[in-house]
Amino acid sequence: MPQNASILLVDDNELIINTIKMSLGGEDYDFLTAFNGREAYEIALKEKPSLIITDVTMPEMDGIELCRKIKTTFETRLIPVIVITAYDALVDKLKAIKSGADEFLSKPFNPLELKIRIRSFLKFKLLLDKLEDVSMVIASLAKAIDARDAYTQGHNQRVSFVALKLADFFNISEATKSEMQEAGILHDIGKIGIPEIILQKPGTFNQNERKIIQTHPIIGEEILKPLKSTVNFRSIIRSHHEKLNGSGYPDSLKGEKIPFPVRIISVSDVFDSLSTNRPYRNAMKLDKSLEIIKEEVEKGFWDSEVFKALEKISAEDEIKILYGF
Ligand SMILES: [Fe+2]
């Protein structure tokens, strides 16, 4: 049993909060409380509780929206969420499943059942924490790559940001978006295996250097292979330099063989590279970046629909501010 696990209780009815606290009396838990989803989300981000138990109907932000936000935020996605529903509230349960809830609790509570279920959830969370630790190590590695080269600083985060904007444009599911977010942050992790002298070389690479640098997607996939939690997005990392006409690397994949999330990450990657300073040239203005990507679409490198979406989202203030356009 984890010591001093923290449980965030979310309900606009203080009576329910107190009932749960009383049911769990005698257990060594720290309780945090919030009276609506918005408040709970802020606490979850800051305190990273071991478990969240939330009501559905609340002012400002309801329990379903809270659960959706928790499960789609990188920092909070592994926190188990239990949603409290009325015994026969099937619609609420369906909504909660869609938003990623881990379990339901029906009112009225059976104190013994509550105790046992919460214990087992906290054990589960302990296992997840171990997984999360590993993925944090990987994220730190990604940051370390960023830090090796002042020119690419923030590249991974920006690629991830642009890719998610594009994913929203295409109404891509939350689950796939979350995989794309991780892939965006980790896509160049394999560069850790590339000598710095090549990575930072101003000017063009010779054939041998190009061969070496082109191994980074495979190295990246290999680094992540031992981690089960990366299974759904490792292929994005391996394929982020593939081109639709088959001229990319490492597998020279063509057309339909390149999944849509990969196409989005690739275009986001190229867009970020063009729009930021490099050792061999200054950042390009928005129009110039788009013009080059358009030419590459015509050459058969990139997906034209993704490019059209990029034209639209790059007109938004968030992107303009991010790149200083
Ligand atoms: Fe790359």
Image: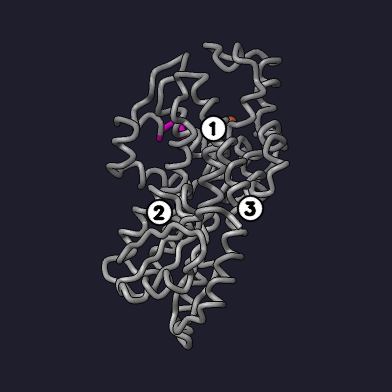
User: What percent of the width, then of the height, locates residue 252?
Assistant: 70, 37
User: What percent of the width, then of the height, locates residue 23?
Assistant: 47, 74
Residue for badge 1: 140
Residue in the picture at 54% in, 58% down: 175
- Residue type beneath disc 2: Ala
Dot placed on the residue nearer the N-terminal end, 1 or 3: 3
Left or right: where does residue 177 sit relative to residue 220?
Answer: left
Q: Is residue 239 above or below residue 92?
A: above
Count the marks. Answer: 3
Q: Is mark 1 within 8 Å of ligand 1?
A: no
- Residue type beneath disc 1: Ser
Q: Secondary structure at mark 1?
A: helix
Q: Are marks 1 and 2 in contact (CB under 8 Å)?
A: no
Q: Is residue 257 above or below residue 216?
A: below
Instruction: For marks 2 and 3, give the CA distance.
Output: 19 Å
Residue in the picture at 38% in, 23% down: 283
Q: Does the magenta portion include 292?
A: yes
Q: How many other residues sit within 10 Å of disc 1, few (<14), some (14-19) or many (≥20)?
A: few
Left or right: where does residue 107 sit relative to residue 127?
Answer: left
Specify start and end residues of the magenta stretch as a single range.
290-294
Q: Does the magenta portion include 6?
A: no
Residue in the picture at 30% in, 37% down: 320
Q: Are marks 1 and 3 in contact (CB under 8 Å)?
A: no
- The numbered disc on residue 44 is 2
Residue in the picture at 50% in, 54% down: 4
Residue for badge 3: 127
User: What percent of the width, then of the height, locates residue 211?
Assistant: 70, 21
